[in-house]
């Protein structure tokens, strides 16, 4: 059964229960109120007829005749017929029952405390009897019974109309609710066929609307990821082709004797091989990170020692470029659990970027370590050319390249690898920059691990 049919059936069942319950309540209340109205009307008429009869005759003998004529008493039962319950009982001033009812037989004496609950009948200012209500329903005449019948028919018609209306509205609401689901189903099938750029129109702000928004975001992310993957594949193919072309040209020329083997030419070939090796290593690192198989060898690491080792590795290059490379570490900074080799890879990438985009005149690069709430922050800060604002949101994407992208390597994977390694440590990485005013790359590592294996 389709969801539309299920929802329609659910609406119909709920409506049937609600309409049925309402009809029963209305019918019972209407019937009770109408009976109360008849009872009060007949009581007033009973009092008037009885008082007039006593005023004319001076006694109660034969009072049943005018009361039956006024249809205030049911006719005497036929032999073998069950007497109709009477709504009223009449007694004399002494409490003797004249017209039986409510469990009292003719001639019974009713106690005074019961009589006080009845209505006294007065003639010329004297109490001549009492009218007691027995609790039996009042007798209904034909016109009154017809009125109740018409009320019940009207309720039945209203209930039937309500059911039809509930069915129509239920079907409409069910279709309205399931329409975005049908759109999502169609878009999902298109997505499964490889048509990634699928967008569903968001019509509501409820849970279904949130589902549609989530699907749209997922579809856009998949399309973007596919485009990025295609771009990365094309870029890597281009990057691999260049050194291979150079190596192929050297080898072919050497084999043909057009070039003589010299140390310089072998060094150039070796540089191209090293370039290929870096590309392969980057791809392998990134693929392991994607598969969740990149393993870290965490150990207690002093931030000061880590940054000093890295500064020592790049200090000669920095001095050769006329750039000052310094380290600043908070004296109270404790050790944290890191993989030193991987972190040197990340920091080395960032320092290489800084050296590339920092000018010699007054150029400075600082490796900072400082405590943060619940963790430690490592920074690589320079006063170089900075990064354009439109580039910053994409800087950690794979194979993203720009004039100031600072990818740090030929493949454009350096910052993507850095991001993967930092996140594998449970940390975060980000950048703050303004074009022409330098960069601040930061990494925040939480101090959650106090024991090391």
Image (spheres, helix red, strand yellow):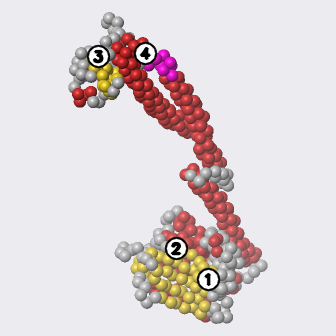
The crowd level at tag 1 (other Cα within 10 Å; few <14, some 14-19, many 20+) is: many
Q: Is residue 230 left or right of residue 57?
A: right
The residue positioned farthest toward the front in the image shown:
124
Label located before the other in sequence (2 or 1): 2
Q: Is residue 49 left or right of residue 227?
A: left
The quadrant of the image that shows the C terminus is bottom left
Q: Report helix, strand or loop for mark 4.
A: loop
Residue receiving disc 4: 70
* Front disc: 4 or 2: 4
Query: Mark 3 to mark 4: distance in Å?
Result: 18 Å
Label located before the other in sequence (4 or 2): 4
Q: Nearer the viewer, residue 223 or 177?
A: 177
Label located before the other in sequence (3 or 1): 3
Bounds of the magenta span?
140-147
Label located before the other in sequence (3 or 4): 4
The rendered magenta stretch, by its main secondary structure, is classed as helix
Say which mark, if any, is on residue 439.
Answer: 1
Q: Is residue 46 magenta?
A: no
Where is residue 306 drawn, in percent x and y? 48, 84
Residue receiving disc 2: 428
Say which mark, if any, is on residue 98.
Answer: 3
């Amino acid at each position: 059964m389709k969801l539309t049919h299920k929802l329609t059936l659910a609406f119909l069942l709920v409506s049937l229960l609600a309409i049925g319950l309402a009809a029963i309540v209305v019918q019972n209340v209407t019937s009770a109120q109408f009976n109360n109205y008849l009872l009060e009307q007949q009581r007033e008429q009973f009092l008037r007829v009885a008082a007039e009869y006593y005023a004319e005759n001076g006694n109660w003998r034969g009072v049943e005749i005018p009361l039956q004529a006024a249809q205030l008493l049911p006719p005497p039962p036929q032999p073998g017929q069950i007497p109709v319950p009477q709504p009223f009982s009449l007694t004399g001033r002494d409490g003797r029952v004249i017209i039986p009812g409510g469990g009292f037989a003719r001639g019974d004496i009713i106690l005074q405390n019961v009589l006080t609950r009845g209505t006294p009948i007065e003639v010329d200012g004297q109490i001549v009897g009492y009218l007691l209500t027995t609790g039996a329903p009042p007798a209904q005449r034909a016109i009154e019974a017809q009125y109740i019948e018409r009320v019940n028919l009207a309720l039945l018609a209203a209930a039937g109309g309500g059911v039809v209306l509930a069915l129509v509205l239920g079907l409409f609401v069910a279709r309205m609710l399931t329409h975005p689901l049908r759109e999502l189903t169609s878009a999902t099938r298109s997505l499964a066929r490889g048509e990634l750029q699928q967008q569903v129109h968001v019509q509501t702000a409820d849970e279904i609307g949130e589902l549609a928004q989530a699907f749209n975001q997922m579809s856009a992310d998949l399309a973007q990821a596919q485009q990025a993957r295609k771009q990365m594949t094309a870029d890597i193919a281009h990057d691999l082709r260049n050194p291979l072309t150079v190596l192929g040209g050297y080898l072919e020329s050497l084999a043909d004797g057009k070039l003589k083997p010299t140390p310089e030419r072998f060094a150039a070939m070796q540089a191209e091989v090293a370039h290929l090796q870096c590309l392969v290593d980057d791809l392998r690192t990134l693929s392991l990170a994607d598969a969740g198989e990149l393993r870290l060898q965490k150990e207690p690491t002093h931030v000061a020692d880590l940054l000093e080792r890295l500064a020592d590795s790049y200090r000669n290059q920095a001095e050769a470029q006329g750039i000052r490379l310094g380290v600043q570490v908070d004296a109270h900074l404790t050790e944290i659990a890191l993989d030193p080799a991987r972190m040197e890879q990340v920091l080395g990438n960032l320092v290489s970027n800084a050296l590339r985009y920092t000018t010699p005149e007054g150029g400075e690069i600082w490796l900072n370590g400082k405590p943060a709430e619940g963790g430690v922050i490592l920074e690589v800060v320079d006063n170089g050319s900075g990064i354009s604002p439109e580039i910053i949101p994409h800087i950690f994407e794979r194979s993203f390249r720009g004039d100031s992208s600072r990818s740090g390597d030929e493949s454009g994977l350096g910052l993507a690898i850095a991001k993967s390694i930092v996140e594998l440590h449970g940390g975060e990485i980000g950048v703050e920059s303004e074009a022409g005013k330098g960069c601040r790359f930061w990494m925040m590592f939480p101090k959650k691990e106090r024991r090391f294996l």
